[in-house]
Image (tube, helix red, strand yellow):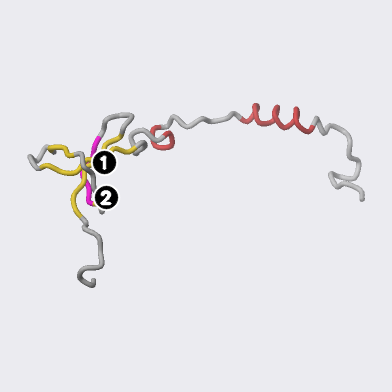
Amino acid sequence: MKNGIHPDYHPVVFQDSGTGGAFLTRSTLTSERTVTWSDGNTYPLVVVDVTNESHPFWTGAARVMDTQGRVEKFERKYGKAGGRSTSGGRRAR
């Protein structure tokens, strides 16, 4: 790596704003806020909206639509297809 062209890469604490969970990692981000970590050192603190502790995919809280609800939505939008086609499912042109 060339000297003087890369940003400073240093330890930073990221904190989830929803759950309060925090983790120490390395980043190029900086912050005016600081926090004293469990090792006794002071690190910059970056507060983020979503981490693996609060993201619906990782917590299992993702909204799942049942198959029956999707079928009913399709039928409301396009109507039932019962018995309209006699050409084996292919539409005549």
Image point (24%, 36%), residue name:
22
Q: Are marks 2 and 1 in contact (CB under 8 Å)?
A: yes
According to the picture, the residue beneath numbered tag 2 turns out to be 29
In magenta, the rendered stretch is 22-26
For marks 2 and 1, the one nearer the N-term is 2
Q: Residue sitting at 89 percent across and 35 percent down?
A: 84
Q: Is residue 56 left or right of residue 1?
A: right
The chief SS type of the magenta part is strand
Q: Looking at the image, is 43 positioned above or below residue 66?
A: below
Q: Is residue 21 above or below residue 13?
A: above
Q: Amino acid at mark 1?
A: Val
Give the quadrant of the N terminus: bottom left
Name which residue lies at 69% across and 30% down. Answer: 71
What residue is disc 1 on? 46
Which secondary structure, mark 1?
Answer: strand
- Classify 10 Å Cα crowding around label 1: few (below 14), some (14-19), many (20 and above): some
Outermost residue toward the front? 32
Residue 87 coordinates in the image, percent (x, y): 90, 45
Q: Would you say residue 72 sits in the magenta stretch?
A: no
| Quadrant of the image occupied by residue 56 | top left
Q: Residue 48 occupies which quadrant of the picture?
A: top left
For label 2, the crowd category at 10 Å Cα-Cα, with few meaning under 14, some 14 to 19 and many 20 or more, is: some
Q: Amino acid at mark 2?
A: Leu
Left or right of 81 on screen, residue 73: left
